[in-house]
Amino acid sequence: MTPAILVVEDEAALVELLRYNLERAGFDVVATSNGEEALVMVEERNIDLMLLDWMLQDMSGIEVCRQIRRQPDIKNLPIIMLTARGEQTDRVRGLETGADDYVTKPFDPEELIARIQAVLRRTRPALADERLTYDDIEMNLAEHKVNRGRRSVTLGPTEFRLLRHFMENPGRVFSRDQLIDSVWGHGIFIDSRTVDVHIRRLRKALNADSEQDVIRTVRSAGYALDSAATTAN
């Protein structure tokens, strides 16, 4: 899986430098110069890490970080602060606000990429592993196999992608539109009820031996992978 990086930076030349180096290192890159837009993007897109400039025009990076850490659905998003403020007090403030790392400008792109990879290994180990596990479910991504306990689970391609998306983001609630974008792809137009059909198929395959249902339905919101799930269809 290719990790997605959101660059929040209002210096256009630096954005292009970051985009070039990150894409060359194998990352997907999206960017914005606006803190408010960044908050919307992390809610609507499947972002794996944010590179966040301290000094933005509409709101500070510190405030963006603070707001993310207050929202249950996205509070665990890895954040690396980028800033020209190199004083120790500023570094401490950034880390205390919730940043996972703090990089001062100017920086070496190779060092920044190494820091990104280190943060992802620590906070999103699934991105560096070909096996995903949750509760008693295991996905072997290389062999395209799923097991629940000792039982082999047979899934269609769409159900496999759905389960993978959930297992890479356990506990997070995704709306039907978010699932369409992440599992079917941006710009794909399908009826949102199609998501419900595939969720039912996934549940049927996972719960074939009357195991606990780990797919939680959140009324008027969407679905989540939750081992304490209580379904309310």
Image (tube, helix red, strand yellow):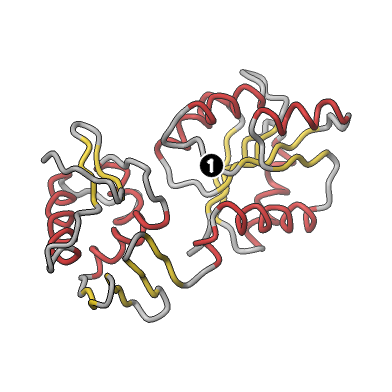
Residue 196 vs residue 75, the one in the foreground? 75
Amino acid carrying label 1: it is: Leu
In the displayed structure image, the side of residue 62 where residue 129 appears, left or right = left
Q: Which residue is mark 1?
A: 77
Residue 111 in percent (x, y) is at: 80, 55
Residue in the picture at 22% in, 73% down: 153
Q: Residue furthest right?
A: 87
In the displayed structure image, the side of residue 50 where residue 55 appears, left or right = right
Residue 119 vs residue 55, the one in the foreground? 119
Residue 143 in percent (x, y) is at: 37, 81
Q: Secondary structure at mark 1?
A: loop
Residue 78 in percent (x, y) is at: 59, 44
User: How many marks on residues?
Assistant: 1
Within 10 Å of disc 1 (Cα), the crowding (few <14, some 14-19, many 20+) is some
Residue 129 vs residue 17, the one in the foreground? 129
Relative to 179, does residue 72 appear above or below in the rendering? Answer: above
In the displayed structure image, the side of residue 203 where residue 96 appears, left or right = right
Residue in the picture at 47% in, 72% down: 130
Residue in the picture at 50% in, 35% down: 75
> In which quarter of the view is residue 161 placed?
bottom left
In the displayed structure image, the side of residue 98 where residue 197 appears, left or right = left
Residue 206 in percent (x, y) is at: 20, 64
Residue in the picture at 18% in, 33% down: 219
